[in-house]
Amino acid sequence: MNRFSNTIDRITTTLGRVSAWLVLGIVTLQFGLVVARYIFGLGSIWLTEAVVYGHAALFLLASAWTLREGGHVRVDIFYADATPRTRASIDLAGALLLLLPFALVLACLSVPYAARSWAILERSQEASGLPLVFALKTLIPIFAVLMALQGFAQAIRAAQTLARKPE
């Protein structure tokens, strides 16, 4: 099980680090759009949508990595000063009772949503917008699967901590 959770960690870390490079593209595009609009009076729906797509991709693909690194919101009143076993209990309960059910429901609801979009190769409603709405919607079930996998890895680690004899 430890090898499985390590594999999940490697996958989410790799995806997170690769998607983190989207920040550079997002900031560069947004800066270029602002300069083009306010200095030259030019705008581009296509580039504006590219910024939105990049932003969505960044958050949806890097969220599992953020969970792995402990960057998600917690109630630190209980967690910060807790013993490792108490933290493991909180992590296990959070993964099993909150994260995994949420990810399962999200996956069940988003797969048909993305499939309908793929069936018609959904495009932007704007005439000069990106023709990739279906690809953007596909990131939602991918997000659900990545979060579920990382939650499962978190639950495995927490269970291993709780299984060890207290010191």
Image (cartoon, rainbow, N blue to C red):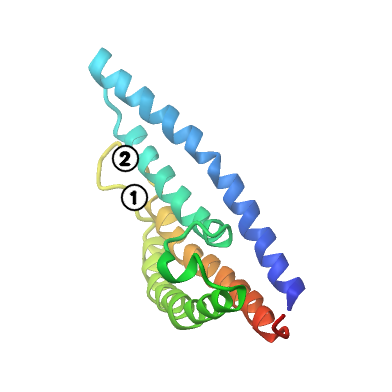
Disc 1 residue type (three-letter): Arg
Residue at 30% in and 24% down: 34
Q: Which of 143 and 166 is in front in this view?
A: 166
Query: Residue 56 at x, y = what percent?
Result: 40, 50
What residue occupies the far right of the structure in this picture?
3
Q: How many labels does the image show?
A: 2
The numbered mark, 1 or 2, whose residue comes first in the sequence reads 1
Q: Where is residue 73 in the image (x, y as percent from the top left)?
A: 42, 61
In the picture, the quarter occupied by the N terminus is bottom right
Circle 2: residue type: Gly
Residue at disc 2, secondary structure: loop
Q: Which residue is drawn at 53% across and 72% down?
A: 82
Q: Which of 24 and 136 is in front in this view?
A: 24
Residue 49 bears which disc, if any? none
1 and 2 marks in contact (CB < 8 Å)? yes
Where disc 1 sits, the SS reads loop
Rendering quarter of residue 106? bottom left
Q: Report the residue at 55% width, 74% height from top.
A: 87
**Residue 154 drawn above or below residue 49:** below
The crowd level at tag 2 (other Cα within 10 Å; few <14, some 14-19, many 20+) is some
Give 106 or 154, whichever is nearer the viewer.
Answer: 154
Crowd rating for badge 1 (residues with CA inside 10 Å; few <14, some 14–19, many 20+): some
Q: Where is residue 84 in the image (x, y as percent from the top left)?
A: 61, 73
Residue located beneath label 1 in the image: 123
Along the horizontal axis of the image, is 38 left or right of 148?
left
Tell me where residue 3 sits by quadrant.
Answer: bottom right
Residue at 52% across, 53% down = 62
- The CA distance from mark 1 to mark 2 is 8 Å
Say which of 44 and 166 sits in front. Answer: 166
Q: In this figure, which residue is indicated by the disc labeled 2?
A: 129
Q: Provide residue 160's location: percent of width, then percent of height.
A: 69, 80
